[in-house]
């Protein structure tokens, strides 16, 4: 079987994890990663002999503007240029800083290479605004896909799960948003909560992916780093009642939703982060969203619940789904997501 050749542009918070995700896929080959400077992430990789997940060697390519001498001085091996990487792959995963991906697209178009962009780019950069569960089939064969943000990705997983079995008319969300990723000092040291103007972009993005669902939302920035928490109030179509028992049954079946409880010790976002580390997950990542069983309550005919979003890793499975769709590896959401889940060991705790 010929493996799909994949490159990753940008080896930061998301790029590191995208490279790992590809390296774990049995039907894909990580050709290389590309970056601008010898960041701590790249230095750590070099100290590990450029070996990443699954014992795969990560070849490093330099984008325009990089000074190779900086890498040479540190003994970091360089395989070539960004354009050489692009010419060697079937598809690029672009996790460059927001706005840079759109500039990189010029090179992807030049060499006829497909690409998947992360949430920081504008929707106009791609042909399809993509989610592995909600609209997989729209991405099949597409040239350019764009992922939803971390919050939107996890939110859609939960809403889509309910929608497919019950039918959802509208949702109202509140996002308690971590202010920065660990190590992002540029965000400053804060002791405050900050409101954003409603509706939040996550609600708008959900409606773009799922136009039949009316969504609105409020977002509050919080001075924490280990994950977001979102509360969701969901209303079914035709006035149907959503019971806690039915919602719980649906959530427990979803491979990328981990149902947890306060009684088990999952008191908040940090509990889930620590649990991922205790599991031995690389970088303490968790691909599943956490959903508190204790938070599921009925409000009339509606249902309310809360989910945890592991912002550094939650979009990785859906990005791998995007490769499968764009490269026509699997034609349906059921087949595509199942393959991704298999290689990333997602949902194994449910068996």
Image (cartoon, rainbow, N blue to C red):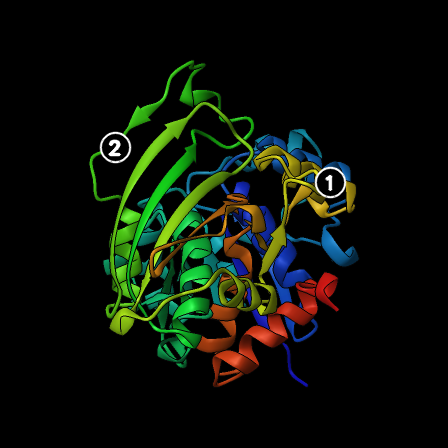
> What x and y, as percent, mark residue 347?
67, 64
User: Looking at the image, which residue sits at the far front?
Assistant: 300
Q: Can residue 186 be seen from the camera position used here?
A: yes
Which residue is located at x 69 percent, y 68 percent?
Answer: 343
Residue 53, position in %: x, y? Answer: 73, 54
Question: Which callout, 2 or 1, points at the residue further toward the start of the chain?
Answer: 2
Q: Residue at x 43, y 56 (%)?
A: 153
Residue 304: assigned label: none
Label 2, on which residue? 196
Mark 2 element type: loop
At x 48%, y 86%, the residue is 331
Query: Compared with residue 180, is residue 117 higher up or lower down, i.e. above or below?
Result: below
On the rendered structure, is 84 left or right of 24?
left
Q: Secondary structure at mark 1?
A: helix
Q: As displayed, is residue 165 above or below residue 100?
A: below
Residue drawn at x 41%, y 45% as measured from the top left: 231
Q: Nearer the viewer, residue 183 or 35?
A: 183
Q: Give the percent coordinates (x, y) of residue 306.
A: 47, 46
Q: Is residue 35 left or right of residue 101?
A: right
Residue at the spot of label 1? 277
Q: Quadrant of the N terminus?
A: bottom right
């Amino acid at each position: 079987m010929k493996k799909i050749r994949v490159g990753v542009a940008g080896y930061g918070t998301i790029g590191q994890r995208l490279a790992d995700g590809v390296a774990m896929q049995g039907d894909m080959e990580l050709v290389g990663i590309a970056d601008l400077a010898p960041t701590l992430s790249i230095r750590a990789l070099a100290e590990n002999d450029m070996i990443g997940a699954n014992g795969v060697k990560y070849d490093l390519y330099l984008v325009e503007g990089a000074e190779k001498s900086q890498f040479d001085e540190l003994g970091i091996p360089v395989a070539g240029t960004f354009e050489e990487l692009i010419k060697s792959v079937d598809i690029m995963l672009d996790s460059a800083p927001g706005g840079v991906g759109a500039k990189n697209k010029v090179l992807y178009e030049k060499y006829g290479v497909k690409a998947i962009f992360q949430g920081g780019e504008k929707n106009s950069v791609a042909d399809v605004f993509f989610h592995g569960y909600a609209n997989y089939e729209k991405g099949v064969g597409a040239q350019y896909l764009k992922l939803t943000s971390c919050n939107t990705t996890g939110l859609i997983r939960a809403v889509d799960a309910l929608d497919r079995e019950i039918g959802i008319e509208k949702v109202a969300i509140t996002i308690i948003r971590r202010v920065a990723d660990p190590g992002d000092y540029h965000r400053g040291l804060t002791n405050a909560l900050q409101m954003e103007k409603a509706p939040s972009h996550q609600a708008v993005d959900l409606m773009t992916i799922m136009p039949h669902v009316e969504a609105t939302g409020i977002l509050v920035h919080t001075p924490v780093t280990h994950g977001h928490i979102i509360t969701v109030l969901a209303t079914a179509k035709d006035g149907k009642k959503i019971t806690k028992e039915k919602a719980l049954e649906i959530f427990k079946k979803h491979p990328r939703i981990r149902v947890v409880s306060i009684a088990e010790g999952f008191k908040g976002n940090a509990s889930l982060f620590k649990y991922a580390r205790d599991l031995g997950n690389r970088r303490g990542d968790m691909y599943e969203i956490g959903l508190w069983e204790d938070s599921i309550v009925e409000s009339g005919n509606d249902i309310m619940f809360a989910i945890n979003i592991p912002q550094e890793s939650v979009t990785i499975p859906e990005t791998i789904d995007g490769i499968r769709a764009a490269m026509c590896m699997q034609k349906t959401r059921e087949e595509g997501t199942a393959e991704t889940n298999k290689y990333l060991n997602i949902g194994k705790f449910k068996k």
